[in-house]
Amino acid sequence: MSTPEELQLTHVHGDRIELRAGGVDLLSYVYRPEAPFEAPKPYLHPLRTLSGGVVTDYRPNDHRWHKGLQLTASHLSGQNLWGGNSWITGEGYQYLPERVGSMSHEGFGEVAAAEGRAVISERLVWRSHAGDAWADESRRIEAGGLDREAGAWTLTWASAITNRRAEPLRFGSPTTAGREMAGYTGLFWRGPRGFREGRIISPDAEGEALMGTQAPWVAFSGEFDGNDGHATLVFAHAPENDHTGAAGEHPAHWFVRSDPFAAVAPSWAFHEELVLDPGATLTRRWRVVVADGSWERDDVATYLAGQAW
């Protein structure tokens, strides 16, 4: 049995946590608050493959609030915890800074690396623009599973969001507010500029025909700027997510885009609102595989089959 590859965590207190392996900085988890109009919230950027290729973007000129991989809520009971302009039914995008809230870092429970696995557990509060506490979030990010032969490593993101208000929280998206095929909300990845017009696949479909559909996983492959080669990111639902809604859970649908930019989100409110009652908790878990190379469906399926949840 091989020994798990050593991981090194560095905590720059009040700013970020960095993870390093084999001479490569695999991720940086930034939790310091940034510009108010960008809906301050923690995010992962940069994310890198084992070869050192960067697979996230940060504050691109088209959407300054797109920051690597982050948990978002574009429409939340009239507030915008996504950032930027707000989509208003019948009016389109409007500059409404009084709607832009935040997800504030409140503290860490665990920051540790051992036996080839790193863990960051965090407490957050979701706040309205006025600063009122609307929800508590318990977040756990795990990284590890370095596989040099496959050229891949895995990241698992789990969040449990509890409604603190005396009324329901209504999770929506621009599509639930009237904009067609723009159901972005929830976990959101923005790819680097070089990944524009990259390839998107699921077990049964390809390209932006995936927009608004259901699948257990989606993979995005793109080519690097700067250094040679391609990378593939695989986004997968944990089994308990019940993304089809078959067991009574709210269904999830994929938001995908390869032009004019690379983006993927397993949206929790694409076609219809998700309503969270007072005191109730919304729990979701996802996995992101970060791999060098351009993977085909069989590559993805084989790799995921070998990964335990």
Image (cartoon, rainbow, N blue to C red):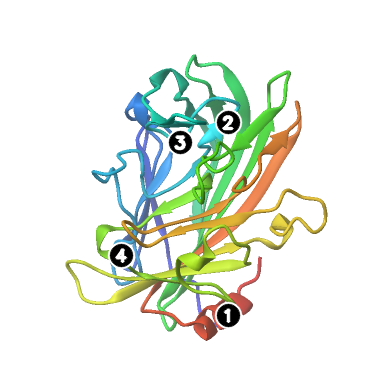
At label 2, counting other C-alpha atoms closer than 10 Å, the crowd grade (few under 14, some 14-19, many 20 or more) is many
Reading the image, the residue beneath label 4 is 195
Q: Secondary structure at mark 2?
A: strand
Q: Secondary structure at mark 1?
A: helix
Q: Residue furthest front?
A: 90
Res. 83 image quadrant: top left
* Camera-nearest label, 2 or 1: 2
Q: Amino acid at mark 1?
A: Ala
Where residue 301 is drawn, which disc sits there? Answer: 1
Image location (x, y in percent) of residue 218 = 53, 67
Q: Is residue 241 left or right of residue 2?
A: right
Image location (x, y in percent) of residue 240 = 73, 57
The answer to which of marks 3 and 2 sits earlier in the sequence is 2
Q: Residue at x 56, y 36 (%)?
A: 177
Q: Amino acid at mark 2?
A: Leu
Q: Is residue 248 left or right of residue 188?
A: right
Reading the image, the residue beneath label 2 is 76
Reading the image, the residue beneath label 3 is 82
Gap between marks 4 and 2, in whole Å?
Answer: 30 Å
The answer to which of marks 4 and 3 sits earlier in the sequence is 3
Q: Amino acid at mark 3?
A: Trp
The answer to which of marks 2 and 1 sits earlier in the sequence is 2
Q: Residue at x 49, y 14 (%)?
A: 130
Q: Viewer-proximal residue, 234 or 199?
A: 199
Gap between marks 3 and 2, in whole Å?
Answer: 9 Å
Q: Secondary structure at mark 3?
A: loop
Q: Is residue 79 left or right of residue 27?
A: right
* Camera-nearest label, 4 or 1: 4
Gap between marks 2 and 1, in whole Å?
Answer: 35 Å
